Amino acid sequence: MKMSLKIKSALILGLVIVLPLTGCKKEAPFEGYTISGAVKGLDKAKVKLIEMNFTDRGSKPKVIDSTQMTNGAFTFKGTVEHPDRVFIEIGDEFHSEFFLENSDITLELDTGESKRGQLKAKVTGSALQQVYEVQQAKIDSIMNQEKFAPLQAIRPKMEAAYKSKDEAKIKAFQEWRAQFSDLESQRQNERRSFMIQYAKDHPDSPVAPWILAFQFSEGRMSKEEMKAIYPIFTGGAKHTAMFKYYEKTYNDIFKNLGVGSMAPDFILNDVNGKEVSLKGVEAKYKLVDFWASWCVPCRASFPHLKELYKKYKKDGFEVIAIGTADAEAKWRKAIEEDQTPWMHLNDTDQDHQYGIVARKYGVPFLPTTFLMDENEKIILRNPSKEELDAKLEELFGY
């Protein structure tokens, strides 16, 4: 049976139409992230993409990926389950931060603009990074208002006073600074209000916890505020490293190591190498104070703490100062310089930033203090100067 010319033509045309559809199938688009980085002023270096971790500052960082930079350029490719802010380490000297999400991201860095190794990355391709930068600019504008200009003189004067180790100069600085206390409070309150409001307005955004940042802490927020803010976060916000820090902080304060909880026992060496346990310290009330030689607020608190120690020591008050996150030689030198008369214990760990006891106590920052009774029941956690004074006066009756 012969095929007509029209049928033959139709079959040939059909093949022409079908073949491209079956033979040129397109690959599915990549749904992860691609990071293209360029570093000015550096040719070769090992580059690491690192996950943030604020819940255990002594732990080794989790490396998401690593690569070798050549000719000042590097590339990463992968998939992230939840967008978050990450840390990028370039060689042994430089580092930066940015929001990682599943998109094509470009990083431009310049070693000539380094501030103690910190590089501010010019980021394109990350929508979350853009949102974050806009909000940070708003915070900066609050802090840099003309009415707050007099506060710029405080830090250099403070550093000079405490560096002198002269108690008279330190006291003079504190008296001078007192005139700015209302202005400092106003600036901090305006900044804090903006941060809290942003979190309330964007509770599901991964950016929100990073805008609020470490404002969610005992020294910067009342416990009532922390209880109110903690439950508002939802969705992507709860998958961030910063929210994990909030979760640990909240549990430590209100569940594990809060007022009414029992402080865990420990054994550490004193300045003479003698082992001392918390339970072995005989005192009616014990103030456990985590500090470091480099911590300016820690050492700034010592003159007043000396007054309290002198006042209540004879009636059963003991200070147990635990040096952590410090070199032993610097710890010993600071004790000698400050002439602090109380018990000093060493909690250094060569493999971790904080020592084992500081990690056991979930120390979030320095100084961190716990006032407890003779049975190690916590009475106050990170009290202010005024709170500690009032509580000791109440406990000792004068």
Image: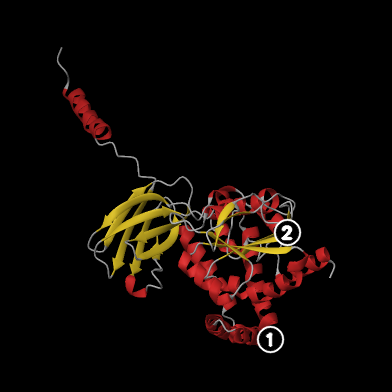
The percent position of residue 132, horizontal first and vertical second, equals 51, 63
| Image x and y of residue 130, in percent | 47, 63
Which label number is shown at residue 139?
A: none
User: Which mark, by number, is residue 179?
Assistant: 1
Colour approach in the figure: secondary structure
User: Quick check: 153 left or right of 316?
Assistant: left
* Quadrant of the drawing holding the C terminus: bottom right
Residue with the mark numbered 2 = 283
Secondary structure at numbered mark 1 = helix
Image x and y of residue 94, in percent: 36, 65
Q: Nearer the viewer, residue 120 or 384?
A: 384
* Badge nearest the viewer, 1 or 2: 2
Image vertical order of residue 51 relative to residue 165, above or below: above
Q: Are marks 1 and 2 in contact (CB under 8 Å)?
A: no
Q: Residue at x 44, y 60 (%)?
A: 98
Please, is residue 230 above or below residue 118 in the view? above
Three-letter code, disc 2:
Ala
Q: Is disc 2 surrounded by few (<14), some (14 to 19) or many (20+) residues within 10 Å?
A: some
Report the residue at 46% width, 68% height from top: 329
Q: Amino acid at mark 1?
A: Gln
Look at the image and tell me whether residue 204 can be seen. no
Quadrant of the drawing holding the N terminus: top left
Question: Which residue, as the protein is rendered here, is positioned at the far left?
Answer: 2
Q: Does 125 sit above or below residue 65?
A: below
Q: Residues within 10 Å of mark 1 (few under 14, many from 20)?
A: few
